[in-house]
Image: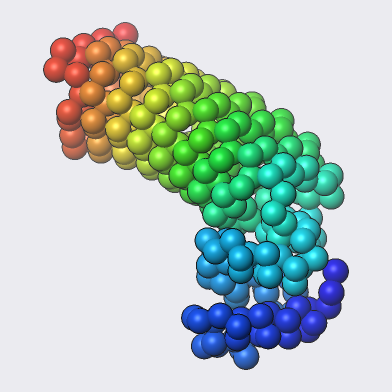
Amino acid sequence: MKTIEQIKQELIVFGKKYDGWEEGLEAIGGNTLTELFGSISPYISWCKENDEKTIDFNNIFNNELVIEDGILLCSCTNLESIIIPDSVTSIGDSAFYFYYGLTSIKIPNSVTSIGNGAFYDCAELKSIEIPNSVTTIGDYAFRFCSGLTSIIIPNSVISIGDFAFMHCAKLKSIVIPNSVISIGDYAFYDCRELTSITISNSITSISNFIFHGCNKLESIVLPNSVTSICNYAFRNCRNLKSITIPKSIVLDGDYIFRDCHPELEIIRK
């Protein structure tokens, strides 16, 4: 890998070739790769949306995965299939953000966390296996992964962030293991092909908008551990005909079942 100063200079030269990069280029900051990527994250997104520029940008980083202190910061390669090395312990925020060409990826057992927006808008990614070492899935981690049809969440995961699987329009089924104690707001919003979901016995709250727009979800059973259902949790689940909830739940959230099936049956158990 080139030195930080070499990379900064190449970025400045590269940026001046394209409109929209001039302002602030001389002030690219950071003494580490992590700091550098934090300061150029808008440029990274812009490059990934423009194929020709992406190739030039990737060349600055030798067309490879950029890793520092065990954190995978970014994928500067145009490969469709990627194997992450065992040296990686965390997939950093936005590491594969807007990585349209990615169709498959292998995550090693060394990885313990998947960062915010890590696979945001990886539209061609159809399936992914999360290893039994990951404990956290960050906010927006798989948002707009519109080609994702299946995902296995291992029983090592403790938390799933806000918007984590939002707009995964082809995701059909998912099992939440008992290790998961929290699922964020909007986590499965607009997963319109979702027909089956199993919720773990460790979940106590069904978050705001969590299943909003899951139009093919016909029935769901909430475990006895659930004590509250938040606002709009099942709104616009137009085919939801049956939901089983604990007797102790007070339905005081706003519009929890609004625009669900007109014959929705709420079963208390």
The chosen color scheme is: rainbow
* Residue at the image point whose x is 60% and y is 31% from the top: 127
Quadrant for residue 168, please give it: top left
Q: Is residue 250 visible?
A: no
Compared to residue 231, the image places residue 242 above or below, namely above
Location of residue 6 by image quarter: bottom right
What's the residue at 30%, 32% (across, down)? Answer: 213
Q: Farthest left residue?
A: 262
What residue appears at the point 46 percent right and 23 percent down from the top-left corner? 172
Tell me if I can see residue 97 in this picture: yes
Q: Nearer the viewer, residue 235 or 24?
A: 24
Callout count: 0
* Quarter of the rendering containing residue 24: bottom right
Does residue 256 lie above or below 32 as drawn? above
Choose between 246 and 110: the one closer to the eye: 110
Q: Relative to 67, is 185 above or below?
A: above
Q: Residue furthest bottom?
A: 26
Q: Residue at x 78, y 58 (%)?
A: 64
| Image position, residue 30 (x, y; %) | 69, 79
Give the image location of residue 218, x and y in percent.
32, 15
Rendering coords of residue 215 (x, y %):
30, 25
Q: Which part of the image, by quadrant, shows the C terminus?
A: top left
Q: Position of residue 210 (x, y in %)?
A: 36, 35
Q: Quadrant of the N terminus?
A: bottom right
